Amino acid sequence: MMESQLVMQQEDFDRVLAIIQKLVRDANAKGIFVVDKAGQLIAEAGELQGIDSTSLASLTAGCVAATGGLAKIVGEEEFPIHFHQGQRDNLHMTLVGDRMILVVVFDERSSLGLVRLRVKKAGNELAKLFEEVKKKTESAMQGQESPFAEITDDDIDNLFSD
Amino acid sequence: MSFINYSSREINCKIVYYGPGLCGKTTNLQHIYLKTNPDVKGKMISLATETERTLFFDFLPLALGEIRGFKTRFHLYTVPGQVFYDASRKLILKGVDGVVFVADSQIERMEANLESLDNLKVNLKEQGYDLDKIPYVIQYNKRDLPNAAPLEEMQKLCNPMGAVEFEACATTGEGVFETLKAVAKGVLADLKKMGS
């Protein structure tokens, strides 16, 4: 089915951030990203200097989508956990709810076991939170005027004026 | 669909360039990448084969500026055009906000255009979208080639719904930004309607 629009208010964003900042500490991770399945970066935390988070988000979504396709071919609904092991850094991706992906980047200061353990709890919290955000978005969109209702054609043209 | 972040005051939208193999989808993105200011664009990613055919997708993030206090970010994607990559095309359409169909003007590619257009409709429908209802622009590419079909014929075959259309030559850049601007405009105009 078509996905609904995602509208994230400041208070919800702060709650997402608090969960992933705690996860960085609990899992001894280098960095954590929350990405939606369409490739949008939702939130990030940790020591992420030098990481191109926009590209990471898009490629994560592509990777998860392709693996999901593979799952269906072999008769699985999804492969909810993906792990990529590198020489220094590793990537752990988990599906959260029906439209989010939690990505943990970690090195030798942590371990796969610890990451899996901590991700399980944080993933459940995030899934619950995003379910609330989805419901909030849906009820806010019903009958209410769009926050962008005031956009004029001139506003849009101005974006391309250079 | 689009992602609106009130915390960072950003609107994120996804635009997909669709069309038959070798019609010029990647060339469109490459031209946009080359001609935009470095502070406006992110890194362009191409997941391509050794012969530079798109294997999975190309990706180009663009930050176009502010609108009513919100930063507008457009994520441009292309799909692999070759018929047998259909599974990948379906994945890339996930969460799409606007579609550009790049048609190849060469007369011998007309059947490939129509096949790809049908494929687009089917794949959108599978995800609950309707081509008549989402922001959609058609680009007649390669108008400079001597074997280009007459425009009227292309319009009749590829654009019976009368969608916004542009003639283009993606290798020189003609029509490329006009196409992007039109689809971005359509996506932003759709945001206006949200909730109403």
Image: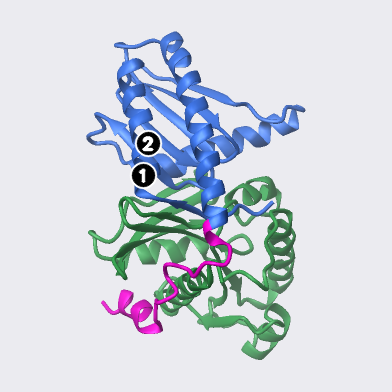
Chain colours: A blue, B green
Label 2 CA crowd tier, 10 Å (few <14, some 14–19, many 20+)? some
Is A150 magenta? The answer is: yes
The residue that appears at 52% across and 63% down in the rendered structure is B25
Looking at the picture, does residue A97 appear above or below residue B42? above
Name the residue that disc number 1 marks. A11
Looking at the picture, does residue A108 appear above or below residue A134? above
Asked whether A4 or A69 is in front, the reply is: A4
Q: Residue B43 — which label? A: none
Amino acid at circle 2: Arg
In the shown orientation, is residue B99 left or right of residue B123? left
The residue that appears at 68% across and 69% down in the rendered structure is B113
In the shown orientation, is residue A99 left or right of residue B26? right
Tags 2 and 1 touching, CB below 8 Å: yes
Q: Is residue B47 visible?
A: yes
Name the residue that disc number 2 marks. A15
Label 1 CA crowd tier, 10 Å (few <14, some 14–19, many 20+)? few
SS for callout 2 = helix
